[in-house]
Image (cartoon, grey):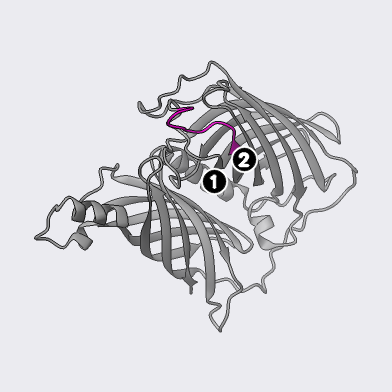
Amino acid sequence: MKKILIFIFCFSTASNIFCQGKKNLPKSGYKWSFEVNGFASKILKHTKRFQPEIPALTYGFELNASYKTFGNKNWHRAFNYPEIGVSYIQTHFGNEATLGSAYGFAPFVKYYITRSKVVDFHAKLAGGLAYLTQVYDPIKNPINNVIGSRLNTVVQFRIGVDFHLTKEVDLQFGATFMHYSNSSVQAPNLGINIPSGNLGVIYKPKYFEREYIVEQDKTIFQKKNEYTFKFGLGVNQKFARGANYPAYSFALQYGRYFGYANKLLAGAIVSFEQYEYDFLVNRQIDEDKDQTFRAMDWSAYLGYEMMLGRVGLSFIVGAYIHNPTLGNAPIWAKPGITYYFPGFGKQKHKPFLGINMKTHYFTAQYVEMNFGIAF
């Protein structure tokens, strides 16, 4: 998962910089679009602990409905007039008895890298919830050690090309990566990763001509530097049918805006995991030392946040500075989504609520709710 997130971060940042300043776009001929898309591939075995046999073919389809933006808000223009929509994603993993199928809904943002009268290049980022028909059961399905709960998150990233066959119809194809996981809320949770190719048709009804709004709204308050206090509460389950353990975190973060909707992040975070503390106490490990401190880890991180109005989509990658007990990799990643409430005061201080997932490579450690204030 870490490598995928780093790729998305680099690709998104480069794409957004490239998309700035597009002033000679063709007129738009539609407001709504509807897409039918099929995909086929094979599950990626990302760890040796993955016990189920990998099926020869995993396949599925998605139905997308989206709304085009025309520049009414500054972030529309910053991301080259993206489309906002929702996907229904149905995946058949190819082994019905063990892995089953997945049925999910995921809101998405589709933004364009470049556009012309003949072809568009785009990137799509979606995240939502999915229901899986087969999960781990110690008696009925003991071989499925990859998914422990029926309700999971589904994350999708796609890069693709839209060929304009007519004014109303596009032929779309691309490459997609999908990830199913419950973020270790219920063990086991190795997750299912599917890189695939996809082919689809897009229908854009009610053809009409409409110009894009190009000029930025200069009256909107925009600061260059932002400082954030952030508190987090996570939960994870270490063993199947075991107890859920809380994890607490506190972060100090600096954000630097470039443009109205792009923000680079840097910060420091300290975390405390109840499971690690209980393990030290119960096993009577290092009783002569501060066991609370031993159950804490300290990290520094860098990241990027796309601001879609009041909603921020963030991708951060961190490195442990102090991590005495965990056997995890030295690098971690956190994808997340944050809602910023309206600012108050002269400096527009913004309270926020969010959720993110902490991962080590392809394995999630825990899901975390966070709240704080940005000023």
Question: Dot 2 lies on which element?
Answer: strand
Q: Which of marks 1 and 2 is nearer the N terminus?
A: 1
Inspect the magenta stretch and tell me whether residue 136 lies in it: yes
Which quarter of the rendered picture does the N terminus lie within? top left
The type of residue carrying mark 2 is Ala
Query: What residue would you read off at disc 2?
Result: 123
User: Does the magenta stretch mainly form a helix, a strand or a loop?
Assistant: loop
* Location of residue 124 (image quadrant): top right
Picture residue at 44% right of the left edge, 70% below the top? 227
The type of residue carrying mark 1 is Ser
Label ID, residue 12: 1
- The local crowd at label 2, few if under 14, some if 14 to 19, many if 20 or more residues have their Cα within 10 Å, is many
Can the viewer see residue 321 in this picture? no
Q: Work out which residue is located at the far front of the displayed protein and give it.
A: 139
* Location of residue 40 (image quadrant): top right
CA separation in Å, label 1 and label 2: 8 Å
Picture residue at 69% right of the left edge, 68% below the top? 217
Residue 173 percent location from the top left of the image: 68, 28
Question: Dot 1 lies on which element?
Answer: helix
Q: Are marks 1 and 2 in contact (CB under 8 Å)?
A: yes
Picture residue at 55% right of the left edge, 31% below the top? 134
- The local crowd at label 1, few if under 14, some if 14 to 19, many if 20 or more residues have their Cα within 10 Å, is many
Range drawn in magenta:
131-141
Q: In this view, does 186 lie to the left or right of 85?
A: left
Residue 67 percent location from the top left of the image: 77, 49
Taking depth in this image into account, of 84 and 122 the one nearest to the observer is 84
Label ID, residue 163: none
Inspect the magenta stretch and tell me whether residue 100 lies in it: no
